[in-house]
Image (cartoon, rainbow, N blue to C red):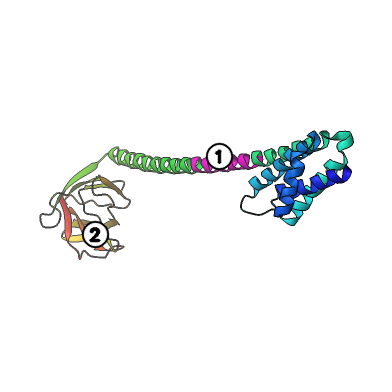
Amino acid sequence: MSNDNNRFTELCTGHVLNALSDSEEKEFQRLLAEADEAQLTLYDELKAVAAEMATLAPAEQPSLSVKESIMQMATGVADNQSSKRTQAPVHIMRWYRAAVAASFIFIFTSIGLLFYSQSLEEDMRGQSQTIAQQETTIELLESEVQRKEELLTILEAREVDLVMMAGMENTNPNGYGKVVWDKQGGRALLQVANMPVVPSDKDYQLWFIVNGQPISAGVFAVDDPQRDNFFKIEQLQSDAREGAFAITMEPKGGVPQPTGDMYLLGNM
C-alpha cells in the first residue's frame, strides 16, 4: 500500500507540473479513479500550489527547483498521512497563501505611498509657486508704497515746482509726464506715461535745460508702457526761474549731451 501511495504521489506531482508522459498520465488517471480520501486531498493541495505559483510567474515554466520543492512537499505529506494527513498540508498552504497575500499588500501599499508622495510633491510645488507669486506682488506693492512716500516727501517741501510735459508730435504724440521738483532739497520725482518700451541697448535720459544748456538729470527705462512710471531724481538743485525739462532716447547709460530724438518736453 505504501508503494501505491508513493507511486500516486510521484505521478500526482508530475501531473500538476505537466511533466508526465502519455503512459504515465494514463496510469495516474487510473490511480486517481481509485484514490482514497487522503490521496484526493493531496491531489487538491498540489493543484492549488501549482496554480498559485503559475499566478506569480505566468510566462515561465516551473523551474527544476520548484518541481523539487513540490516533490519534497508531496513526499512529506505522504510520509505523514498516517498521523497528520490533513494538518501538515493545510499548515503549508495557509503559510504560503499568507505570504502571497502579504506580498500583494506590500506592493499595493508601496504603490499607494508612491502616488501619495507624488501628489504631495505636486501640492508643494503649487504652494511654492503661489508663495513666489505672493512675494512678487508684495515686492511690487512695497515699491509702489515707497514711490508714494517719496512723492509725499517731495510734496511736503516748502517750495515745489510742478512742470507738465507733453509728447512730441513726430516721436510720441500720446505721451505725457510731469516733474515734481523740490528745489531746496534738490529732489524731484518724474512721472511719465504712454512711453514706448526702451530697446535693450538704449535708455531714456532726462535733461534740465537752462539758458539753452542741457544738464543731465539721470537715465531710466520703461518696461510697461500701459501704466504710469515713476522715477526718483536724487540731485537736481538750481535757482533758475526759467528753463525746461526734456526726455530723449540715448545709448545705454546716457551721454554727456543729447544726441537722440526727443520724446517729451515741458517748460517751467
Q: Nearer the viewer, residue 186 or 122?
A: 122
Describe the element under mark 1 as helix, strand or loop.
Answer: helix
> Residue 157, image x and y in percent?
29, 39
Q: Which mark is residue 107?
A: none
Mark 2: give few (<14), some (14-19) or many (20+) Cα within 10 Å: some
Q: Which residue occupies 58% across, 39% down?
A: 112
Residue carrying label 1: 116
**Quarter of image, res 39:** top right
Describe the element under mark 2 as helix, strand or loop.
Answer: strand
The quadrant of the picture occupied by the N terminus is: top right
Instruction: Using the image, determine if residue 162 lies above or below residue 214.
Output: above
Instruction: Using the image, determine if residue 169 lies above or below residue 158.
Output: below
Which amino acid type is marked by label 1?
Tyr
Is residue 117 part of the magenta span, yes or no? yes
Specify whether 197 is left or right of 143.
Answer: left
Which amino acid type is marked by label 2?
Ile
Q: Which residue occupies 31% across, 38% down?
A: 152
> Residue 115, image x and y in percent?
55, 42
Specify whether 13 is left or right of 115.
Answer: right
Is residue 241 in view from this perspective? yes
Question: Magenta stretch?
Answer: 106-123
> Residue 173, image x and y in percent?
12, 52
Specify whether 14 is left or right of 208.
Answer: right
Q: Earlier in the sequence, mark 1 or mark 2?
A: 1
Residue carrying label 2: 215
Q: How many marks?
A: 2
Q: Which residue occupies 76% across, 54% down?
A: 65
> Residue 101, image x and y in percent?
68, 38
